[in-house]
Image (cartoon, rainbow, N blue to C red):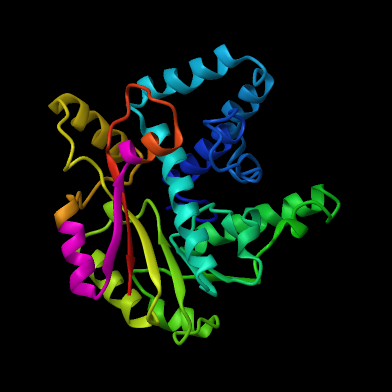
């Protein structure tokens, strides 16, 4: 990871969120007005271009489906999983969850875009370089807006950014120092991270998360990257090669049974476990090209 820059995948994910923010219904699942302004400017160009043709359903559909063909549906699962996680988070907050921890927050802006987080303490955990970039970018946006457009968008009861180098720092110590309260229910988001870690790192993080979680706490984590999918060998190699070329190779692809076993061993009870295809069936009209390359497990302590 370069100093003062977010990871490549964090930037690409935010760019896709920006793109789908400009889509009309039903593809506009989780609008994120900040996404296009947080990413390095070249990555914001597709969203800005789409905004110019947003009034043309044919053009929008062509972008949606054409990009899906070009990247084997990777754009679909980013848009869909964002909404699926948002819905799981809303349900937890409605049940009384008072804390949100975003592990590997990247350029996530839930603390600023979800009104349901009013009164919820948010902890964004990420590498110091990514956090510095995000803080400086938000400060720059606030200045360009005259100090009035970006800051009031924060809807959370509080936001603590917790810099953690996972190779050197202890996550539990960093969170506790930032004000995390283990006696209160929390919702943990671990989105788009686990597949890039070793199995040992995944197990350790789940154990630590469980140890910090009061009864009733929940975790939503994505995993997968193809073990449950019957794809041609060339397509699987292409998808994995794309991530390898970005410097963030898939290290631990996990099937559903494997992840559920890890969660159970850490002390979590799985509430739901869905794939990209399941999300698409719930949120979008029927379409071809949906490959279930990723899953989302929601589990309770």
Residue 268 is one of the magenta-drawn residues: yes
Left/right of residue 140 with respect to residue 217 in the rendered view: right
Left/right of residue 209 with respect to residue 27 in the rendered view: left
Residue found 42% across the figure and 45% down from its top: 81
Image position, residue 183 (x, y; %)? 45, 87
Image position, residue 281 (x, y; %)? 37, 34
Asked whether the viewer can see residue 124, the reply is no
Asked whether the viewer can see residue 50, the reply is yes
Residue found 37% across the figure and 81% down from its top: 215
Using the image, determine if residue 109 lies above or below residue 48: below
Image position, residue 119 (x, y; %)? 65, 72
Q: Quadrant of residue 42?
A: top right
Image position, residue 251 (x, y; %)? 22, 51
Q: Of all residues shown, which one is farthest toward the bottom?
A: 183
Q: Nearer the viewer, residue 134 or 119?
A: 119
Magenta segment boundaries in residue numbering:
258-278
Left/right of residue 282 with respect to residue 135 in the rendered view: left
Residue found 47% across the figure and 79% down from its top: 175
Q: Of all residues shown, which one is farthest toward the right?
A: 146
Pick the quarter of the image with the C terminus: bottom left
Q: Nearer the viewer, residue 215 or 232?
A: 215
């Amino acid at each position: 990871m370069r100093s003062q820059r977010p990871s490549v995948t964090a930037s690409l994910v935010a760019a896709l969120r920006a793109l789908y923010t400009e889509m009309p219904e039903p593809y506009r699942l989780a609008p994120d007005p900040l996404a296009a302004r947080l990413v390095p400017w070249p990555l914001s160009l597709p969203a800005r271009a789409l905004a110019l043709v947003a009034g043309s359903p044919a053009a929008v559909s062509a972008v949606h489906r054409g990009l899906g063909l070009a990247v084997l549906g990777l754009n679909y699962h980013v848009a869909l999983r964002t909404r699926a996680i948002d819905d799981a988070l809303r349900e937890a907050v409605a049940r009384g969850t008072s804390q949100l921890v975003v592990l590997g927050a990247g350029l996530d802006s839930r603390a600023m875009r979800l009104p349901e987080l009013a009164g919820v303490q948010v902890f964004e955990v990420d590498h110091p370089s990514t956090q510095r970039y995000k803080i400086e970018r938000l400060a720059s946006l606030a200045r360009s807006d005259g100090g009035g457009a970006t800051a009031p968008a924060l809807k959370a009861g509080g936001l603590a950014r917790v810099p953690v180098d996972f190779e050197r720092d202890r996550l539990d110590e960093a969170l506790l120092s930032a004000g995390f309260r283990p006696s209160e229910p929390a919702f943990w988001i671990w989105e788009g991270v686990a597949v890039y870690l070793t199995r040992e790192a995944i197990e350790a993080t789940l154990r630590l998360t469980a140890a910090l979680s009061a009864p009733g706490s929940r975790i939503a984590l994505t995993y997968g990257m193809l073990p449950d999918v019957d794809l041609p060998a060339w397509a699987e190699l292409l998808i994995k090669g794309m991530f390898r070329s970005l410097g963030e190779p898939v290290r631990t692809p996990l099937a559903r049974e494997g992840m559920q076993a890890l969660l159970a061993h850490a002390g979590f009870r799985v509430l739901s476990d869905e794939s990209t295809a399941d999300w698409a069936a719930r949120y979008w009209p029927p379409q071809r090209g949906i490959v279930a390359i990723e899953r989302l497990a929601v589990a309770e302590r």
